[in-house]
Amino acid sequence: MKGIAMTQNQIDKIEEIIIIFNGREKVVIEEFLTFEDVVRYSFDNPPTGETVDFSIQFTNGHPENPSGSHRRGGHKVKVKHRMEFVVTPTNRS
Amino acid sequence: MSLPLIDRSLDLQNLRFNGYHIELRAGYLLIKDVPYVNASREVKKDGVLISKLELAADKTCKPTDHVTYWMAESHPHKHTGEKITSIENPSQSMDLGNNLIANFTFSAKADYSDYFHKMETYVNLITSEAQIISPDATAKTFPVAVSENQDSVFEYENTAISRDHTGEFNNRLAKLKVGIVGIGGTGSYILDMVSKTQVQEIHLFDGDSYLQHNAFRSPGATSINELERRLKKVTYWYEKYSAMRKNIIPHTVFLEKSNLALLNALDFVFLCLDTCTEKTDIIQELENQNKPFIDVGLGIHAKEKLDGLIRVSTSTSQNRESAHQTIPLNNINDNNNDYSTNIQVAELNALNAAFAVIRWKKLFNFYQDKNVEHYSSYWISANEIINEDKGGTSKNTDQ
């Protein structure tokens, strides 16, 4: 099948998905984000390892799932332009 | 356990709630410290108004006898000097027993709906004359209602309870022995709230001393003197809250493997400690003992302004695994200070404590529990609470 060249109009319609992590805007290329993806976007030096003890909350997400938490274990959150995540350990009392 | 007569009778509760100095003695109801005008037109404040109490089924019933007695040096007078004749009754002085002398008898015949109506009617007739001379005179002296109930955990009663009818709900918490592990910012606010419930015992676990910076995120206002005493946290809080209630038991220890038997006697535990390796052992022990617990945690960071999360994780025998997913057990290696969560602020500790106490009370059927959420977090900037790990039963008292 021959490839079809895109018109300039079509190229312009592809939006960049921008998502805010801890107040910082990032361009996100994935359609779904795992826990580890969110951690990676949130920090310049993301920690690695099996036990990554962050609490994550998001808002302004897709209508089916506009707000919630995120967990390890393969869960995925569908991205939406300008949704927001907060990522932090909740380890203080 | 039977309630005192006052707690079973709405009219007596009303008298107390309105500030009258009431006493029940040998079948009589007394209103003490009633102001009146004596024969020399002086305002006295030591009048005692007495009424026989008619009871049915262990509480007061509608009074059929309109008569009252007066124990004082003089019959009450009008401000102008004459006796208040409208209530005067010619009966002789009578010894009613138990140090009660009816120096005078009153009779203001009316259909009294209850003892509040009856006593307030007489009191108003008498004190209104005193108030003409001395406007501040009042029988509503609001004396401290020291606990009559010997089984009560409080030094003085919550006189609001009988009015707002939450007595039955409060009783649901009454037999519990609750532990608070870690009496830092959040733990101290949890103590503040739990101490005002009727729980049987409150056990405090913390090995730390109470230091200057702690004062800025605890309830109340610590004095310099108190800081200089260099008390252990559990001692400081034990002293403070023992002013109000009994059975606060301080343990000057950090809970860890060797002393986990201290948890044996408890029915419920609040974990309010910074994440540490001991937490894993404590949680393991609570699970082994089949005990429900709540773990709290703050995560606040500062960029241009502060933001972060306030978390409550609930663990019962029905959701141990999912609770493991939300309770941080390890501190993240943070050389670059990217994830620093050292910040705590009083209102955030208090909010975390309030969420935890509400969640606990839901488990024990004090509050309605629509979601039975076992995980919730509050995001400061978004002002949003999310509720997850929903479902299961709310009643976790049968282990």
Image (spheres, coloured by chain):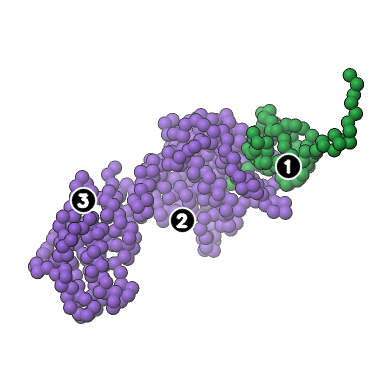
Chain colours: A green, B purple
Which of the numbered marks, if any, corresponds to residue A82?
A: 1
Name the quadrant of the N terminus of chain A.
Answer: top right
* Percent of width and height locating residue B35: 26, 71
Along the line of sight, which residue is nearer the eye, A35 or B95? A35
Q: Is residue B281 above or below residue B190?
A: above
Q: Mark 3 falls on what kind of element?
A: loop
Q: At label 2, which amino acid type do we have?
A: Lys
Q: What is the chain letter for disc 3?
A: B
Closest to the camera, between mark 1 and mark 3, is: 1
Label 3 is placed on what type of residue?
A: Cys
The chain under label 2 reads: B
Label 2 neighbour load within 10 Å: few <14, some 14-19, many 20+: few
Q: Are marks 1 and 3 on the same chain?
A: no
Can the viewer see residue B353? Answer: yes
Above or below residue B384? Residue B33 is below
Q: Earlier in the sequence, mark 2 or mark 3?
A: 3
- Quadrant in which residue A18 is drawn: top right
- Residue sitting at 69 percent across and 54 percent down? B305
Q: Horizontal and vertical percent for residue B331?
A: 66, 40
* Mark 1 crowdedness (10 Å alpha carbons): few <14, some 14-19, many ≥20: some
Question: Contact (CB < 8 A) between labels 1 and 3?
Answer: no
Spatial CA distance of label 1 from label 3 is: 67 Å
From the top left corner, tell me how far across and down residue B155 is, in percent.
Answer: 36, 54
Q: Is residue B386 left or right of residue B142?
A: right
Residue B240's label in the rendered image is: 2
Which mark is on residue B329?
A: none
Residue B235 pos. (x, y %): 48, 52
Closer to us: mark 2 or mark 3? Answer: 3
Give the chain of mark 1.
Answer: A
Q: Which residue is mark 3?
A: B61
- Helix, strand or loop for disc 2: helix
